[in-house]
Amino acid sequence: MRGRDEDTGEFFSPSRSEQRRAALDVLELGEQLVAMTATQLGRLPIPEELLPHIRETQRITSFGARKRQLAYLAKQMRKLDDEALDAIRDAMSKDGEAARRETAALHRVEALRDALLGDDGDAALTALLAAHPQADRQQLRQLLRNVREERARNKPPRAFRELFRVLRELLAQDGDASGEEADDAFDGDEGDHG
């Protein structure tokens, strides 16, 4: 029996139905994790002790054995705290906070790259170097020249992608706050390059 608080009349613990729903939610999350590739799993905040159970479940092909192993995986997942499970769900969700932050960071990098390649690229580069003094000025200038040359010769965008990678790493070193500051420096340039 669950028992009730005599003063408030509230139950001490969740009902069986609530416990079952929670267990089925964890089982469904386990099924989603098992369906993912190793690369996709690597992007999620999955505790190390859970990864061998996921890999073992992925390895099993027999229906009955796989079902038992999946139930065991769910049992191991229920031992985790709710914050860990919520972090996994959030990282898996396309609408999750982590996905929104990552998308916003990519948009900042794209806007910065467009500003650097725009008509007022020198001012944008000066602002970038002021906001990020650790940046390699020579490398950035060379990449910008290479991108312009690629565009002029109608070549594949190798330097364009390399510039994006370098800018993303640069903004990631300083964290989101510096990235937002650098983005603010280029807000006025956005309309000129769209």
Image: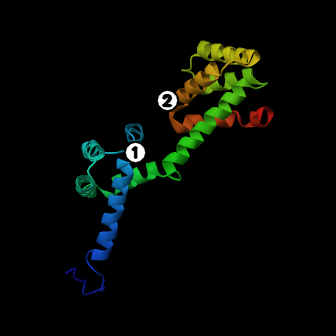
**Which quarter of the image is occupied by the N terminus?**
bottom left
111 vs 131, nearest the viewer: 111
Q: Alpha carbon of mark 1 to alpha carbon of mark 2: how far?
A: 29 Å
Which residue occupies 25% across, 77% down?
12
Query: Left of 113 or right of it: where is 77?
Result: left
In the image as oriented, which residue stretches furthest toward the left? 1
Which residue occupies 36% across, 59% down?
28
Say what amino acid the circle numbered 1 marks: Met
Which residue occupies 64% across, 26% down?
128
Neighbour class for label 1 at 10 Å: few (<14), some, many (≥20)? few
Q: Give x and y (percent) for residue 91.
A: 44, 48
The residue identified by callout 1 is 36
**Which quarter of the image is occupied by the C terminus?**
top right
106 vs 17, nearest the viewer: 17
Q: Give x and y (percent) for residue 29.
A: 37, 56
From what the image shows, is residue 191 above or below residue 11?
above
From what the image shows, is residue 17 above or below residue 85?
below
Query: Left of 33 or right of it: where is 153?
Result: right
| Colour mapping | rainbow
Q: Give x and y (percent) for residue 113.
A: 66, 28
Residue 165 visible in the picture: yes
Q: Give x and y (percent) for residue 69.
A: 24, 53
Say what amino acid the circle numbered 2 marks: Gln
The residue identified by callout 2 is 173
From what the image shows, is residue 162 above or below residue 66?
above
Neighbour class for label 2 at 10 Å: few (<14), some, many (≥20)? few
Residue 182 visible in the picture: no
- Give the secondary structure at mark 2: helix
Instruction: Give the mark toward the camera: 1 or 2.
Output: 1
Query: Left of 190 or right of it: where is 29?
Result: left
